[in-house]
Amino acid sequence: MKSLVFATHNLHKTQEVKELLAGKYTVLNLTDIGCTTEIPETGTTFVENAGLKSKFVLENYQLDCFADDSGLEVEALNQEPGIYSARYSGGKGDLANLQLVLQKMEGISNRKARFKTVISLMQDGKEHLFEGVINGTLRTEPSGTSGFGYDPIFEPEGYAKTFAEMSMEEKNQISHRAQAMKKLIAFLRA
């Protein structure tokens, strides 16, 4: 069976993908291959950042790999925080990032936003890209205790609750990351 590296140290993400690709691939993460390097995200787009991580593993470990980059894009903030979503407040954490977005959105009626994920798969020396997007709106204050990041203020289109008010199963059916993963998995199974 072929091995495939997921460029993450997140055990929950790794296990989820292992189950989805069982019987077809042995899925390893960065810890499994002995990679302790914090792979820099110096790109200016989600595509570039995902590609930097997957190519780093290919070049340094000679293993097929996939990596993702995700973020929140707010229409009224010229698509900010975008690729800086995880470090929007200068590395002060999820709550500070969320509060900064709410502060910048004070008094703005256009609440349109979207979450976006891009996955870069490096396989047999070629890059394949998969994208997932979910549109929605931003609440004026946080609601819900599930999820992480901007989930407490993001209400997906067609729902009357935030990602943080959904169960993990419900969110994983519709999220940007789930959409991109489904495309990746369909490609790998083909």
Image (tube, rainbow, N blue to C red):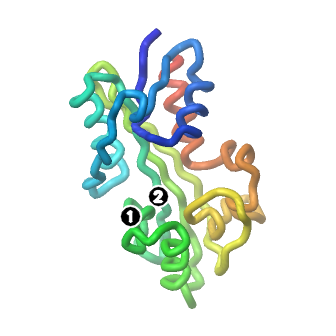
| Location of residue 155 in the rendering, given as x and y in whole percent from the top left corner | 67, 65
Give the percent coordinates (x, y) of residue 94: 52, 67
Residue drawn at point x = 43 percent, y = 13 percent: 2
SS at circle 2: strand
Where does the image place residue 5, in percent across and percent down from the top left? Answer: 41, 28
Q: Quadrant of residue 121?
A: top left
Q: Which residue is mark 1?
A: 84
Nearer to the camera, 98 or 135: 98
Q: In the picture shown, does residue 95 fall above or below 185?
A: below
What is the secondary structure assignment of the residue under circle 1?
helix
The residue positioned 44% from the left and 76% from the top of the image is: 77
Please tell me which of labels 1 and 2 falls first in the chain.
2
Relative depth, front residue between 68 and 182: 68
In the image, residue 42 lies at what x, y percent? 25, 55
CA separation, marks 1 and 2?
A: 7 Å
Label for residue 28? Answer: none
**In this rendering, does residue 98 appear at all?**
yes
Label 2: how many Cα within 10 Å (few below 14, some 14–19, many 20+): many
- Vertical position of residue 145 compared to residue 12: above or below: below
Q: Amino acid at mark 2?
A: Gly
Residue at the far top in the pictured view: 1
Tag 2 residue: 71
Question: Is residue 80 visible to us here?
Answer: no
Q: Is residue 104 left or right of residue 142?
A: left
The quarter holding residue 162 reads: bottom right
Q: Marks 1 and 2: CB-CB under 8 Å?
A: yes
